[in-house]
Amino acid sequence: MTKEHKRNLRLSHLGKKFTAEHRKNISLVRLGKKLSPEHKKALAKSIGDSCFDRMLRKFYNGFTEVEYNEMSFKQSGTCRICCEHETAKIKGTIKRLSVDHDHKTGKVRGLLCNRCNHILGLLKDNAYIARRITQYLEEVR
């Protein structure tokens, strides 16, 4: 894993000073440990409302930056579909993985790279079309 990808996995702390309890919680998240809902709330509150965290909560039914980081850790910082690291850049910086969610229920399904997220959007989450594309590719080999 490159330094850039490791940096993308870190929690954004916005230059704040943290308590020993907060640092312990961050360490648990990085080690892939489950946090209780109370710990998640406390950790999110101590991190503060980052722009990214506000965006997540607004668009993904209260999904927090802590949960994003936990999911990213479980996926080893890679796309849930292609298992590759994100390569798309914005202003020279590698983007975060996109949050994939069910548009009907709002439930978060996983983190995807830009390419897989676009493909899924073009398919309109239609598994039948995805199977037909797979069949086609296998037939024309």
Image (cartoon, rainbow, N blue to C red):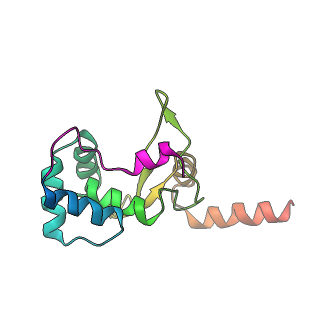
45 vs 121, left or right, is left
Q: From this viewpoint, which residue is outermost toward the front?
A: 20
Q: Please name whichever residue, 94 or 2, is drawn nearer the observer in this view of the structure.
A: 2
Q: Quadrant of residue 67?
A: bottom left
User: Is 77 inside the magenta-drawn segment?
Assistant: no
From the top left corner, tell me how far across and down residue 51 is, in percent: 24, 39
Percent position of residue 60, x then y? 29, 55
Lateral position of residue 136 relative to residue 8, left or right? right
Residue at x 41% of width, y 59% of height: 72
- The residue drawn where x is 56% and y is 49% is 122
Q: Is residue 125 left or right of residue 51?
A: right
Give the magenta-colored segment's residue range: 1-18
Q: Is residue 109 visible?
A: no
Q: Which residue is at a point 17% across and 44% down the rendered structure image?
A: 49
Q: What residue sits 23% from the left and 39% below the top?
A: 14
Q: Nearer the viewer, residue 116 or 74?
A: 74
- Percent x, y of residue 110: 43, 62
Q: Which image quarter holds the C terminus?
A: bottom right
Farthest residue to the right: give it. Answer: 141
- Residue 10 part of the magenta segment: yes
Please state the horizontal and vertical placement of residue 75, each as a whole percent of the image: 47, 63
Residue 26 makes an appearance in the image: yes
Q: Report the predominant secondary structure element of the magenta stretch.
A: loop
